Image (tube, rainbow, N blue to C red):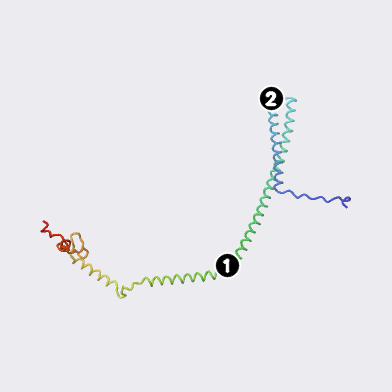
Amino acid sequence: MRRIFGAPQKKEPPPTLEQAGDRLTGRGDRLDDQIRKCEEQLMKFREQLKKTRPGPAQEALKRRAMTVLRQKKMFEGQRETLYNQQFNMEQTRFTVESIQDTVQTVQALKGAAKQMRGAMKSNKELDLNFIDKLQDELADMADLTAEINESLGQSFAVPDDVDEADLMAELDALEGDMAAEPVAAGGVPSYLQEAELPELPAAPQRAEEEGMGLPPLAQRS
């Protein structure tokens, strides 16, 4: 059968956008070179026409210059077509890359959503009811701590029946007592001055001297 119909030929894969873009870029570079060569030839013809007198020689130069000019216009038209193709190629490439990025983004979001659902199911700490209950317990403990601190901060030495009027009367009485106390030269009341201590009596020396076998002071002198 292969001898009759021949072996099936393998189809080559279609070119990618990068390969097609590189091919268009190469063609555009070649057209740019041809356009540049035509411009150089036209510049030479222009200089020759300036130096040539009117006549058959000048007409021949004009015909050759017109031919080069037509070629330049043709190359410029082809180059414009390649510009449009390259623009469409870039737009298509951008669209394909955008689609690929969108697919990857959706896949990443899908995986993240799956992880979030698993975490919500497996972790008790992420249960809303558990969090509300925990918040209530913390609030109750905070209130209890405040009550304990308030209870511990009570002063047992202060009677409850003392009011502001009694306090002001006590302060006025203290102020009167301070005014009645004599004040020293330095402006210090007597109850704040240091008390004068009595002088100590002189220690007897005769007994000590006799005990040590020494004669009295009168005899030694």
Element assignment for label 1: loop
Write down the quadrant of residue 184 in the picture: bottom left
Mark 2 or 1, nearer chain start: 2
Point 65% across, 56% down: residue: 104
Q: Amino acid at mark 2?
A: Lys
Left or right: 200 as drawn, with respect to 51: left
- Read off the residue under disc 1: 123
Which numbered tag is attached to residue 148? none
User: Which residue shows up at 69% across the image and 24% down it?
Assistant: 51
- Is 67 in front, or is 109? 109
Quick one: quadrant of the C terminus?
bottom left
Q: Is residue 16 left or right of residue 195?
A: right
Classify mark 1: residues with Cα within 10 Å, few (<14), some (14-19) or many (20+): few
Residue 12 is left or right of residue 168, and the answer is right
- Identify which residue, 126 or 201, lies in the foreground: 201
The image shows residue 21, relative to residue 213, as above or below, that is: above
Q: Residue 205: where, in percent of width, then height?
A: 15, 62
Give the side of residue 127 with respect to residue 219, left or right: right
Asked whether 98 or 143 is in front, the reply is 143
**Quarter where residue 113 is shown:** bottom right
| Residue 212 in the image, given as x and y percentages of width and height | 17, 61
Q: Nearer the viewer, mark 2 or mark 1?
A: 1
Q: Residue at x 69, y 39 (%)?
A: 29
Q: Is residue 11 above or below residue 127?
A: above
Residue 62, quarter of the rendered image: top right
Which kind of residue does numbered mark 1 sit on?
Asn
Please give the residue where the numbered disc 2 appears in the rendered image.
51
